[in-house]
Structure formats: C-alpha cells, structure tokens
Amino acid sequence: MKKLIAISVVFVLLTAAAFAQPSVGGNLAAKITLIASSSEEDAPLVGGISFENSHVNVDYANGDGTAGGRVRLSGRSSQIGWWGGLPFAFGWWRPIPQLRVQIGHNPDGDFGAAQITGWGFNAEAQNSVAIDQDSGDSGANGWKAARRAGFYGGYSELGATLSLYPMDGLTVNLILPFGDGRAEGHSKGVGTIYPKFHLNIVYSIPDIGVVRITFKGNGGLGDNEDYPQKVSAGDIFASFFLTAIDDLGVDLGIAYGLGYKDASDLEVNPNGLSIGLGLRFVSGDFGIKFRAGTQLARVTANAAGDDVVNSDTTIGVVILPYYSLPGLRVYLNAGFGMNMPDPDVSDYNRVDWFVNPYITTSVSSFTFYAGFKLWSDGAPDADTDAVTKWAIPIGFNSYF
C-alpha cells in the first residue's frame, strides 16, 4: 500500500510538470443495513455495513485542451474497486478538432446510449437504498429488462477509441478492443480482436433529439480456419432520444442480435430482439421516471445440444415518481417483471417484483439516504412458494 501511495505521488508530480494543474477529486459511499430478513421459515435477522465506493480521481489536461486523461486510485486494499485488477486509467489526445483518440481503460463506460433507463435512473442511491441493477439485492431477470433492453450499453473494457467529428451534430466513434475484454497482452490473434470492434454513430438534430446507431462486434466475423469462433457476428442497436417537448424526455431503443451456427451446426440467436423505452417528466417539485423493456425471439441450443429451444420472453417495468420537499426528496421506486417460457416448454410464468420507497437529503456534496426494500424474485416453478425479502438500509454518498 505504501508503494502504491508513493507511485501515486510521483505520478501527480510528473503530470503537474507536463500539464496544467491536475484536479483531484473522488467519491466515498457507505451502506448500513439496519435490519433485513425474508419470509422463509426461521429466517434470521441480519444487518451489516459496507463501503460501496472509496476512490480518488486524478484528472489532467494540457493548457489548450488537446490532451489529458484520468487515473482512479482505490482506497480498498483488498480489491481495486468493481472494475477488477486492471487499472482504471486512460489518456486522450485531440490533435485537431475533428479527431480524438483515447487509449486505456474506462470502466465507467464510453458512448452508452440509454439516457433515462440506465445507471442514472436511481444513480448513487443504488449504492445503499435503491433496488436496481447494481444494488446486488435481486437475482431476478424480469424487471431488469427495463434497464438493459434495447440500448447500447457503451464500452467499459481495455482498448482504444477514435472519435471523428466531421460536421456539426455528427460524431462517429470507432472502438478497437485490443485488450480482448479486461485482459492485457500482446500475443492475441488479430482474428480474435478486430472482429469485436464497435462502430457508434451519433447525430444530434437541433431542437428535436439525438439518434444513435451502433454495431457491436462479438467476434463471429473472425470465424475461419485460423480463428474459429462459433459466436454471433454482432448486435445492432438503434435509439432515439426526444428532447423537443419541454419538461418531457422520451428514449426509445431497439437491439437485434445476429444469428449464427454454433459448434453443433444449429441455427441459434441467444440475444434475439430487445426493445426499451424510457420516459422522464418534471413539473416543479414533482418528477417521474418510467422504464420498460422486453427481450424476445431468442433461440438457444437445448441442454443436450442436439436441438434448438426458444428462450423465455422477458418483460420488465419500473416506475420512479419523486417529490421535492424543503431539504428532502421522497422517491417511490417500484417494478415488476415476467419471464414467459415457450408454451411447448412450460405454461408457468415467473413473476418478480419490488417496492422500494426511499428519501434523500443533501448538505453541500454530502447526501444521506434512508429507505425500505421489499422484493421477491418469484417462485422457480408452480409448486414452490416465492420468497419475499425485506431490508431497512441507510447510507451516505460524498463527492470531494
């Protein structure tokens, strides 16, 4: 740990000499579960505490804004944050206004398309009191479709990105995943790297909205004798974020995975078709967010690998009304999901749900949270009772 601190100090001193004064900031967040349990017989009452965030960011750029980067240092010795052992570090260079190059690893993601339905739906509240994709409470797949279906999720792995700005309102982003995920190395076959490129096109229509179209390569384009890869060539995403109506935002996304022949020569398409919708309305102290998503037309191999089966059709819906009071904001986070199997497989539809009121209050950059969680992942089959879980958490989040 002392060595890490020493290296960090040297890094800051070196960048200060070559760049303008670096900015240092960070985030500290913690969660306390006051009490939690479930409807299972003799279920224990439990509680606990955890740090959900503890990092420092060092951001640097030269005086004319043509080069810079970020390094994130974790305050946890046992693990380097949620991004794993690979450093959270990247640098960028903009030699001309029409071109920007970035190299490194940005686990926070670049170019994500979801403007309403993604992480920002509950934002930092999911570190402690809000049930969401990243809160770690629910294993259910149903309502989570409302967050992830239909929209390009961006790129959070190791690699290089090139951004072109050929005209006002138009951006073309090319992602080259030289790291093949989060693995470093210099001897990977090019047929396993370049077929996983992402091409992202963003066009902003003044006073109307933003169109985003993306091709995300999954490696199947490199399927040949030298680099056999029985996977999809990729996924295609298209989304439109409407901004033309005052106080109302509408985000619609559609994604389709390209089918392929697997190792058993079966025609499969595990990603199929997905559709996502996000709405956001604000009027004075009142606001409401809504998201819905569905995943369908997915085809995979059966357990024996000798035939194809239709995967569950999944539907998720989440609503988040909120109201601002003096010094306080009140939220009601609630949703449900359904997993509906092919009728030839089963007639049992699994239903999951959650109800999650919480409050936030802020003082400067410090936010305090308190809430109540009640949820169920649904019963796995018609003969099993669903388990209902509950928890009373509090937490805080502070930027500096």
Image (cartoon, rainbow, N blue to C red):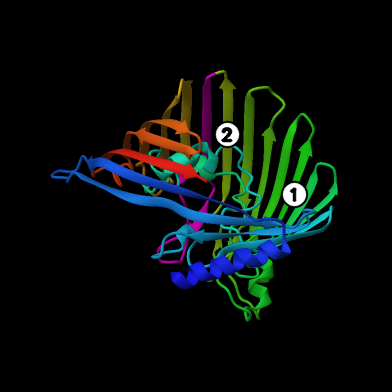
Which quarter of the figure is the N terminus placed in?
bottom left
Mark 2, secondary structure of its residue: strand
Q: Tell me where the magenta segment starts and ends, as one range.
A: 285-314
Q: Position of residue 35 (x, y in %)?
A: 24, 40
Indicate which disc, 2 or 1, sits on the residue closer to the N terminus: 1
Residue of label 2 = 278
Q: Main secondary structure of the magenta part?
A: strand
Depicted 347 relative to depicted 69: above or below: above
Q: Which mark is residue 186?
A: none
Side of 157 relative to 346 (left or right): right
Q: Indicate whether residue 250 is drawn in magenta.
A: no
- Which residue is found at the position 84% from the left and 42% from the top? 168
| Residue 313, percent from left and from top | 47, 44
Whether 365 is drawn above or below 269: the answer is above
Residue 330 on image: x %, y %: 42, 26
Residue 41 sits above or below residue 173 on the image: above
Residue under numbered circle 1: 201
Residue 343 in the figure: left or right of residue 9 = left
Crowding near the residue tagged with mark 2, few <14, some 14–19, many ≥20 C-alpha atoms within 10 Å:
many
- Residue shown at 58% from the left, 35% from the top: 277
At x 49%, y 69%, the residue is 4
Asked whether the viewer can see residue 25, the reply is yes
